[in-house]
C-alpha cells in the first residue's frame, strides 16, 4: 500500500503519466473494435512469429494491438512500482520504447521469459533485480526469437513452446553482460545501445538456427489506411505530455518564478549533446515532458509529410523518439540526423516511404548525440549513412532483433567517430574521453 500511496506524490509524476497513457490505450482499444474481434485478434498476436516487420495492427486489428500495448504498458509500470524504483529519464524512456514496440513485435508471451532470464541472472550474481531493471526492460528486443521457436510448427506444439520459453531464460540471463560490454564499442554515441547488444545475440541465434535447417522467413505484415485515427491518437499524446508539465503543480501555487524556472530548464536540455547516459529528468525535472511532446509531434508530422503510413512499426519509431526525449534527444540534435536520413531515402533504390526507409528515418535519431556533440553537418552525415546500413544489416540477424536500427546505428557510430577525430580532434577528445 505504501508503494501505491507514493504515486500521489509529485515526485512520482512520471508513473501517473504512464498509467494515464495505458488507460487511454485501453479505452481506445474498445473504441476501435468489438470485444470479440479484440479477443480473437489478441490471440493471433500472441501466436504470431513477431519477426521484423510484424505489424500487430495488421495481424490482430487496431483494437487488439492497442490492448496488447496497454497490457504490456501496465505490466511495465507495475514492475517499476512493485520494485520501488524511483522515476528517472532512463525508465521513462524505457517505458515509451516498450509500449512502442508492443505495436510491433513484443507481447506478454514473448517478453516474459526474457525478463525472467534477467531475474535469474540477478539471483545468480546475488545482486538486486533493481540493479538490472533497465536490461530487463530492453531485453524484449529479442522477443521474436522466442516466438519463432515457440510457434515453429514443425515438432510437438507443447515442446516447441517450452523450448521457446527456455530460450528466453537463457537469452535474458546473458543479456545484461552483453549490453554492459557493448556500450564501449560506440562510446555512448548510439542511444540504442541495447539494440546493438540484441543484434549481437540475434546474429548468433540466427546463424545457429539456419545451420540447423530452421528457415527464418521475413514478415511482410504492414498495415495502412489508419493515418487519421493514429494521428489523432499521437497528437493527443503530445498534448497530454505538454499538459502534464503545466498541470503537475496544480495543487501548488504556480508563480511567474516557477513558470520561468521550467522554461529555463527546458532550454537547458538543448545544451546537452545527448551522449549516453544523459538523464534529462534527473537534471531538468518535469520540463522533459515539453521536450517529449515536441518530439512526438515532430515524429508524427514527419511521417505524415512524407506520405507514409502510421501503423504499428512507425508508431514504434515515433514513441521511441518520444521516450528518448527524457534521455538524450531534443529537436536540436534530432533534426539534422533525420534530415540526413530523409535525403538518403530519396536517393536510394527504394521508395522513400518503403518500410525499411521510413523506419530508418525515424530510428536514425538514435545517433542524435553525434549531431549534439559535433554539429549538424556530422548529424546529417550520420543520418544519411544510417539509412543505408539499416537497409541491409537486418539480414544478418534474420529479423530476430526488434531494435535492428540500434544495431545498425552502432556500426555507423563506430565508423564515423574515427573520421570525425581527424577533423575535430579537440572536440572529439573532449566528448569521447570525458564523461
Image (cartoon, helix red, strand yellow):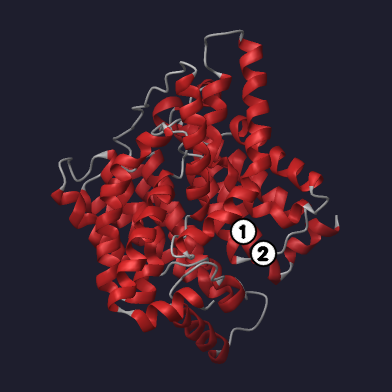
Answer above or below: position of 59 versus 342.
above
Q: From the viewer's side, name the closer residue of 388 and 231.
A: 388
The residue under the point 54% across, 18% down is: 151
The residue under the point 64% across, 45% down is: 74
- CA gap between label 1 and label 2 equals 6 Å
Residue 384 placement: quadrant: bottom left
Residue 156 placement: quadrant: top right
Image quadrant holding the C terminus, namely bottom right
**Mark 2 surroundings within 10 Å by alpha-carbon count, few (fewer than 14), some (14 through 19), many (20 or more):** some
Q: From the viewer's side, name the closer residue of 346 and 72.
A: 346
Callouts 1 and 2 close, C-beta under 8 Å: yes
User: Which residue has dot 2 on it?
Assistant: 87
Looking at the rendered structure, the secondary structure element under dot 2 is loop
93 lies left or right of 13: left
Residue 331 placement: quadrant: bottom left
Residue 34 in view here: no
Residue 309: image location, x then y, percent: 29, 41
Answer above or below: position of 33 versus 419.
above
25 lies left or right of 301: right
Disc number for residue 335: none
Q: From the viewer's side, name the closer residue of 42 and 84.
A: 84
Outermost residue to the bottom: 257
Residue 93: image location, x then y, percent: 54, 58
Q: From the viewer's side, name the closer residue of 250 and 132.
A: 132
Outermost residue to the right: 1
Residue 29 in view here: yes
The residue under the point 41% across, 55% down is: 410
Total number of numbered discs in the rendering: 2
User: Which residue has dot 1 on it?
Assistant: 91
Residue 94: image location, x then y, percent: 57, 54
Answer above or below: position of 336 versus 28.
below
Image quadrant holding the N terminus, namely bottom right
Amino acid at each position: 500500500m505504501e508503494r501505491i500511496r507514493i504515486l500521489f506524490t509529485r515526485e512520482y509524476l512520471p508513473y501517473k503519466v504512464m498509467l494515464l497513457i495505458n488507460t487511454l490505450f485501453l479505452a481506445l482499444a474498445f473504441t476501435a473494435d468489438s470485444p470479440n474481434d479484440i479477443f480473437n485478434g489478441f490471440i493471433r498476436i500472441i501466436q504470431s512469429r513477431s519477426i521484423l516487420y510484424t505489424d500487430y495492427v495488421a495481424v490482430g486489428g487496431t483494437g487488439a494491438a492497442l490492448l496488447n500495448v496497454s497490457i504490456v504498458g501496465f505490466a511495465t509500470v507495475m514492475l517499476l512500482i512493485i520494485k520501488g524504483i524511483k522515476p528517472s529519464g532512463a525508465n521513462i524512456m524505457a517505458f515509451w520504447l516498450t509500449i512502442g514496440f508492443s505495436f510491433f513485435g513484443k507481447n506478454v508471451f514473448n517478453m516474459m521469459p526474457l525478463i525472467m532470464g534477467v531475474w535469474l541472472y540477478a539471483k545468480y550474481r546475488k545482486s538486486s533485480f533493481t540493479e538490472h531493471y533497465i536490461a530487463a526492460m530492453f531485453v524484449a528486443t529479442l522477443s521474436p526469437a522466442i516466438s519463432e521457436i515457440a510457434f515453429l510448427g514443425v515438432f510437438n506444439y507443447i515442446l516447441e513452446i517450452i523450448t521457446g520459453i527456455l530460450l528466453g531464460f537463457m537469452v535474458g540471463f546473458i543479456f545484461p553482460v552483453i549490453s554492459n560490454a557493448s556500450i564501449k564499442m560506440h562510446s555512448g554515441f548510439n542511444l540504442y545501445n541495447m539494440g546493438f547488444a540484441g543484434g549481437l545475440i540475434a546474429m548468433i541465434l540466427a546463424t545457429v538456427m539456419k545451420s540447423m535447417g530452421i528457415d527464418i522467413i521475413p514478415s511482410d505484415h504492414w498495415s495502412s489506411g489508419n493515418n487519421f485515427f493514429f494521428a489523432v491518437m499521437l497528437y493527443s499524446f503530445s498534448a497530454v505530455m505538454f499538459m502534464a508539465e503545466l498541470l503537475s503543480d496544480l495543487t501548488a501555487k504556480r508563480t511567474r518564478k516557477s513558470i520561468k524556472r521550467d522554461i529555463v530548464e527546458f532550454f537547458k536540455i538543448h545544451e546537452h549533446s545527448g551522449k549516453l547516459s544523459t538523464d534529462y529528468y534527473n537534471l531538468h525535472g518535469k520540463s522533459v515532458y515539453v521536450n517529449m511532446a515536441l518530439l512526438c509531434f515532430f515524429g508524427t508530422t514527419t511521417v505524415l509529410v512524407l506520405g507514409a503510413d502510421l501503423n504499428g512499426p512507425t508508431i514504434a519509431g515515433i514513441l521511441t523518439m518520444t521516450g528518448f526525449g527524457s534521455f538524450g534527444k531534443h529537436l536540436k540534435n534530432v533534426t539534422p540526423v533525420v534530415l540526413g536520413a530523409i535525403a538518403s531515402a530519396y536517393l536510394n533504390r527504394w521508395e522513400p516511404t518503403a518500410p525499411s526507409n521510413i523506419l530508418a528515418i525515424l530510428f536514425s535519431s538514435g545517433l542524435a548525440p553525434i549531431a549534439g556533440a559535433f554539429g549538424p553537418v556530422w548529424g546529417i552525415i550520420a543520418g544519411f549513412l544510417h539509412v543505408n546500413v539499416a537497409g541491409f544489416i537486418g539480414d544478418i540477424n534474420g529479423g530476430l532483433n526488434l531494435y535492428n536500427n540500434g544495431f545498425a546505428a552502432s556500426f555507423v557510430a563506430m565508423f564515423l567517430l574515427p573520421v570525425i577525430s581527424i577533423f575535430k580532434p579537440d572536440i572529439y577528445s573532449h566528448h569521447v574521453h570525458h564523461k
